[in-house]
Image (spheres, rainbow, N blue to C red):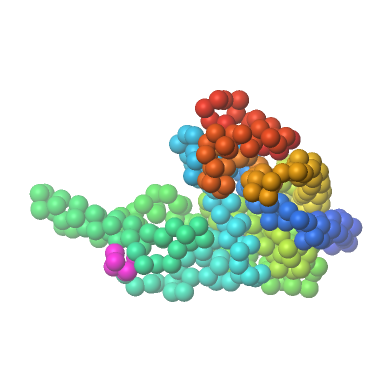
Amino acid sequence: MIYDISDVQIEKLLIAAARAGEALARLDERIDRSPMKHGFIERQDFTDAISSMWVDGELVHMEDLVLHDAHMDVRAPTHEMTAAHRILRSRRLIFSNAAGWAFTAPGLSRLRGRAALAEDPAPPRQTLDHARDEETDEEGETSLDGAFSELDALLARSAATLDAITTGTALPTMHREEESHAIINEPDWDEDERLKEWWDVHARTEELPAILRTAILLDAWNMIEVLQRSPWLGRLLASAFLRDGAVTPDHLPALSAGLRAVPRERRHARNQTQRLAALLDSFYEAAQAGMKEHDRLTHARERMMRKLAGRRSSSRLPELVELVVSRPVVSAAMIVKELGTTPQGAIGLANQLELREVTGRGRFRAWGML
């Protein structure tokens, strides 16, 4: 598929682009000056991950994602939960790196889950000992991709050897990794070729304003269907592009939250200009939702901070306030882990603030802001 931008009616999109750009810039300036900047950005990461799953037709509850991220699941994580957490980690990874990192070869390969291919398209085989010394990911967990690949290859060769000994047949030449890849992914889906076409759109839109160019790049990603199993990456790259283009230099916009406010019929219209107008409107809605959420959190934080008047300097309540601001949901176990209190002390601290009980259970309790 060739994504053509020659038929785009730019003049019909300028007003929507200007409105969206102004709203996102105002939100970014407000976040930069906010005393709870880091907490708000944390919340936006969770919101965007949940909204991105919603846009793709999957439902993940905010409380479950927060607890899964804190390694405190109350049930076995589902496939949807794993995907939402990957989106959450990818947002953090993009924001923790310098502007423009997501569009470099190593960065894009890392986000696609192909970090091993970033430097060398055909890396040499690694031993198990060397694989254990690979660099850690953004959460400090050691990457075991190389070790697992070696184990799979070893098991495949062992099984093939035993089968050849017992049946007298020749050893198979297909590796287990190649066979599983053919089963999971469509063999005709050339992601590298589709990504090359998307980069061509990126090059052909260099003279357009950043906000309009972002909408075109996101629409091109959706129409080309670059990745077979990660459609959400296009939305993260759009957020990264807005950050790189100095529209929102201090945060990654939660664009998926804005897409929820735009009807699906508009987002998937046949007409290209109508789709782009819908995307620009979603950018505006994302900015408006962010400002409303920031105002709500600001008022709630000020109300809780007033309760700290007259407290001892050793009180843990100020730390709890900041924790509550930075997380949509906090459990007793999370308070114990972050503040170093006892379980009963955590419950006592939470009862001193105006927090909303979200579980209604006596054994496992969690709270959120009113």
- Residue in the foreground of this view, choosing between 292 and 315: 315
Residue 261 in the figure: left or right of residue 317? right
x then y, percent, for residue 362: 55, 25
Relative to 275, say whether 113 is above or below.
below
- Segment tinted magenta in the rendering: 126-131
Residue 235 in the figure: left or right of residue 119? right
Q: Is residue 4 visible?
A: no
The C terminus: image quadrant: top right
x then y, percent, for residue 204: 71, 71
- Report the magenta stretch's main SS: helix
- Residue in the foreground of this view, choosing between 175 and 188: 175
Which residue lies at the image location 57% right of the left edge and 31% below the top edge? 365
Which residue lies at the image location 14% right of the left edge and 52% below the top edge? 162
Place residue 127 in its image quadrant.
bottom left
x then y, percent, for residue 54: 64, 41
x then y, percent, for residue 352: 69, 35
Which residue lies at the image location 79% right of the left edge and 52% below the top edge? 287
Place residue 61 in its image quadrant.
top right
Which residue lies at the image location 57% right of the left edge and 57% below the top edge? 90
The N terminus: image quadrant: bottom right
* Residue 127 colored in magenta in the image: yes
- Residue in the foreground of this view, choosing between 224 and 291: 291
Q: Is residue 38 visible?
A: yes
